[in-house]
Amino acid sequence: MSQQRDYSSQSYSPGGAGPARCQPTHHRINPAGKSREKDDMVGLNDKFVQLIDKVKNLEDENKKLDTKLGILKEQEEYEGKVDDIVKQLENELEQQIESLLRDQENLQDELLKKHEEVENTKQRYKDELQKKADVENDFIVTKKDVDDGHLEEVNLALELEDLMGKLDFLRVGYDEEIKELESLVQNKTVILADNSKRFLDMDEIVESVKNQYAKVATRTREEAEQWNQRKMDAMVLTAGQREQEVRDVKREISDMLRLIQRLNGDLDALIRKEVALRKDIGVLSAKGDSNLEKAGEDIAQLEEALRRAKQDLAGQIREHQELMNLKLALDIEIATYRKLLEGEEERYRSTTVRYTSASNLVKPLMLLFAEMHHNSIMLSLTSFFLLHLCEECLTSCATQVKTDFF
């Protein structure tokens, strides 16, 4: 490498008196050193060609990247609708929650109404029980009155029997008295007839007395019979009224019992309905709580997915920005190297014009460069070594660009 540096400094020195200095150098170089330097130059030239190929490949890749970037820019950006989906899901969940709350309020109102109906039914049941107790009390009182009426009827029957006995006794007594009076009148008539000559007509008197007693007995019997008949009619009427009242009371009691049974059935049905409504409310409450928990979990998952998507999008934007920065740096670096190559080419051309009478060792090298590069782009050894030092940097940068882009 020291020989290469010596050769480079001797061959491409821009100082004056170039031909005078090259002539002694040509006489000092032995054939073995010349062959070795030629081989070294061929190897360096091969490396230089490889480096130029790599630079061309990097330029091609840069063009490909520009093309891909243009295609990506021309593509329509798809804006994710995650926020809209989350909002729609939130609206649906809010509507479900509002519907469940309305159903809960309706069920609570219905439950309150059922409670009121149950309370009203209980109150009516209590009132009916009170009415039943009052009717039973009235029935007991009426039954007592009926019993008293029956007792009074028996007493009246006994009294009637006594009166009939008294009437018969009085009739018998009256008959006996009449007979006694008749006997007395007859005897006196006989006596007066015997003792006195005056005629006393007692038949009229006896007949009058008989008629009077008969009228009194008849009137008394009729009055007693009328009184007994009125008493019996009143007792029969009272008994009929009492029996009708008893039948009415029994009918009312039967109606009350049927009403109580019906109210008991309604009360049992309302109690069962209340239990069913409580179960439904419990099930709906549990379902609503589970739906709320599930909705909260879904919202949390969607928010987490949205956050991750935003992070991924930010990372992609950041990577895209880094890629653009790297591309810009590569463009600048490639332009810099292109300028250096053009400058070295110009300097080499000017050096070629000045050193047309160079040594025979430099001429084959220039011919070799001219044959390998049809576009007449040649670099000096100084720029070649500079590019050789940047070769690994360019390769690593290109690899990183490929990795980041794909």
Image: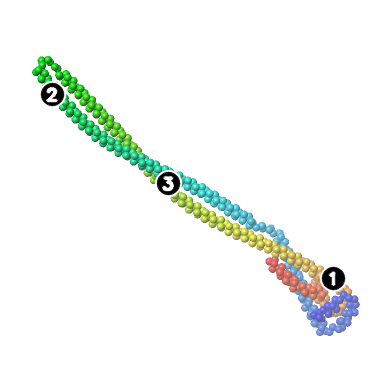
CA gap, disc 2 and disc 3: 90 Å
For the residue marked with disc 3, what is the amino acid? Answer: Asp
**Residue at horizontal 87 percent and vertical 81 percent from the top:** 25
Please name the residue shown 50% across and 54% down the image. 283
Disc 1 and disc 2: Cα gap in Å?
205 Å
Quarter of the figure with the N terminus = bottom right
Percent of width and height locating residue 380: 82, 74
User: Where residue 316 appears, x then y in whole percent?
Assistant: 68, 63
CA neighbours of label 1 inside 10 A, class few (<14), some (14 to 19), many (20+): some
Q: Which residue is mark 2?
A: 183
- Earlier in the chain: of badge 1 and badge 2, it is 2
Q: Nearer the viewer, residue 406 or 85?
A: 85
**CA distance separating discs 1 and 3:** 115 Å
Q: Quadrant of the C terminus?
A: bottom right
Residues 226 and 199: in front is 199
Please tell me which of labels 1 and 3 falls first in the chain: 3
Question: Whole-percent x and y of residue 384?
Answer: 80, 74
Mark in the foreground, 1 or 2: 2
| Closer to viewer: mark 2 or mark 3 | 2
Q: Which mark is residue 266?
A: 3
Residue farthest front in this picture: 195
Few, some or many residues within 10 Å of mark 2 (<14, 14–19, 20+): few
Question: For mark 1, what is the residue?
Answer: 346
Residue at 86% x, 73% y: name it: 351
Instruction: List x then y, in percent, for residue 98.
Output: 56, 51
Q: Amino acid at mark 2?
A: Ser
